[in-house]
Amino acid sequence: MSFELARHVFAPGEGEALEMHGPTAGRITILVDPVNSGDTELCTLIQTLAPGAAVPVHHHEKAEQVLFFISGGGKASIAGHEIDATPGTTIHVPRGIAHGIANTGDAPLSFLETTSPPGFQETFRRLSQLAEPNPEEVARIAAEHDIHIKPDAP
């Protein structure tokens, strides 16, 4: 079996960088997924939300996630509970559980996100191509990749 080191080891600043616009403004850096790393059953990325940006409340029917907050400050919701999202906080999100994240601070909020199985990251690739995605477009594209946004989510 051949092993390409560059597909499995990422120095700071490396990875597939996507600029996000609209309510989820910020940056996503995809590190590990089937496109970048080959045969894998997970996706790991770093998401950075600009001040005031948010990931709307949503759930995944097929995937579970682990979120580890790196820097900044904000609020996370999981199963109707609101918690502080501060550096060092880890959240495990089982399948089917509603969750969302908001940057309520004045600096970028960054977190490492690992999801299994992969696939949802295709939403980010598509949305990064849109200058100003509207909520209906976001919900439609997201639903195609197992991200089910609550209709009344902020």
Image: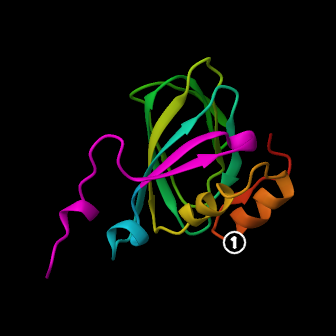
Question: Which residues are the magenta region?
Answer: 1-30
Instruction: Identify the secondary structure beneath mark 1.
Output: loop
In the rendering, at what x and y percent does residue 28 appear? 52, 47
Quick one: 21 or 145, which is closer to the camera?
21
The residue at the point 18 percent across, 63 percent down is 5
- Compared to residue 55, the image places residue 117 above or below, namely below
Image quadrant containing the C terminus: top right
In the rendering, at what x and y percent does residue 134 appear? 84, 52
Q: Amino acid at mark 1?
A: Glu
Quick one: 110 or 67, which is closer to the camera?
110
Q: In this image, 92 relative to 153: left or right?
A: left
In the rendering, at what x and y percent does residue 139 appear? 78, 59
Dot 1 surroundings within 10 Å: few (below 14), some, or many (20 or more)? few
Q: In this image, 103 relative to 47: left or right?
A: right
Quick one: 119 or 148, which is closer to the camera?
119
In the rendered structure, does residue 18 fall within the stretch colored magenta?
yes
Label 1 sits on residue: 144
Q: Residue furthest left?
A: 1
- Compared to residue 154, the image places residue 151 above or below, namely below
The residue at the point 75 percent across, 42 percent down is 22
Image quadrant containing the N terminus: bottom left
Quadrant of the rendered image containing residue 126? bottom right
Q: In this image, 78 relative to 90: left or right?
A: right
